[in-house]
Amino acid sequence: MPQNVFVDIHAHVLPGIDDGPKNLGDALALLRAAAGCGITTLAATPHVRSDFPEVRLEELAARVQALREEAERESIGVRIVGGAEVSLVWAVEASDDELVLASYGQRGKDLLIETPASAVAGLGQLLYRPRSRGLRVTLAHPERSPEFQRDPSQLEELVRQGILLQIDATALLAPRRSPARRLATRLCRDGLAHVIASDGHRAASWRPVTALADAVGVASEIVGPIRAQWMVCVTPAAILAGVALPNPPPVDREGGGALGRLRSRRRS
């Protein structure tokens, strides 16, 4: 696939229901920005948690379809897939039917769960509950968690259990001393991160969807361009399709591009 083709499994693009775009115009601006930076497929993943009561599962499919139609009228070349970013509490308590409605494409195959902001005892056991009902779980932005920043080994165990990890593009673009960037970099370098997504909320400014394209270069320096492309195109496409992940290419610990080659020469 071309190197500038991205599949984004985490974006807040549905207007007026969570902390994403406030109106249709802003949502279309986000989609135009996504198309302009190479995103060809984007999942609409509004928050499903108690502080966003306007997000109603039974309305999501219709809202996604309405946005698709508006994007087609505006000739915006981004394929929009339905989904949600659900809280852990919600995922544990949800019925089977509710889990299906929150899953990507409402296929009942893959579910995006927001990493809890605070430590949760027995997280692996809690995540097993939706998995036991046939859902593959992707954990959104674990690099933000102070608990995981203190003890990343917990994430290693979750990956061994079959949990997928999605890191935010903005974490890779944060200042180098940022705890989120340090953990995101480590997860990439150790081969634990499966996906990079925008977690886009706006066309520009706060959590811009375009951060995904900007982060690919950083990821390429960490893991090499082939592994980076697996994380921004191949793996997210498999998640949205509900199929097995293709085998990952090896992590190139020397990184990619001119910076990686320069570092290699300096060490030799």
Image (cartoon, helix red, strand yellow):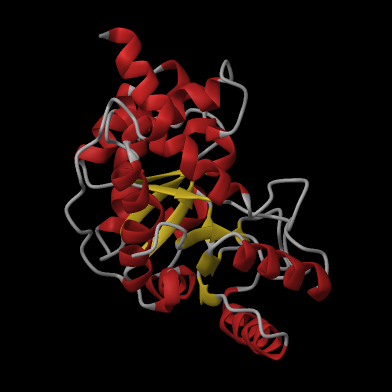
- Residue 98, how many percent across, how many down? 46, 72
Image x and y of residue 260, in percent: 37, 26
Horizontally, residue 197 falls left or right of residue 62, namely left
Q: Does 65 sit left or right of 88 as displayed?
A: right
Q: Quadrant of residue 58?
A: bottom right
Q: Is residue 31 left or right of residue 132?
A: right
Labels in figure, total:
0
**Residue furthest to the top:** 267
- Residue 217, above or below 222: below
Q: Is residue 45 left or right of residue 162?
A: right
Which sits in the foreground, 262 or 221?
262
What is the x, y in percent for residue 73?
71, 91
> In terms of depth relative to the viewer, which is nearer, 255 or 56?
255
In the rendering, at what x and y percent does residue 86 appear? 52, 56
Where, quadrant-wise, is the N terminus in this rendering? bottom left
Given residues 174 and 21, the one toward you in this image is 174
**The C terminus lies in quadrant:** top left
The residue that appears at 72% across and 85% down in the rendered structure is 74
Q: Is residue 241 above or below residue 153?
A: below
- Splitting the image into 4 quarters, where does residue 60 fall? bottom right
Please name the residue shown 23% across and 59% down the image.
245
Above or below: residue 74 compared with residue 261: below
Which residue extends farthest left?
A: 247
Residue at image point 63% right, 64% down: 36
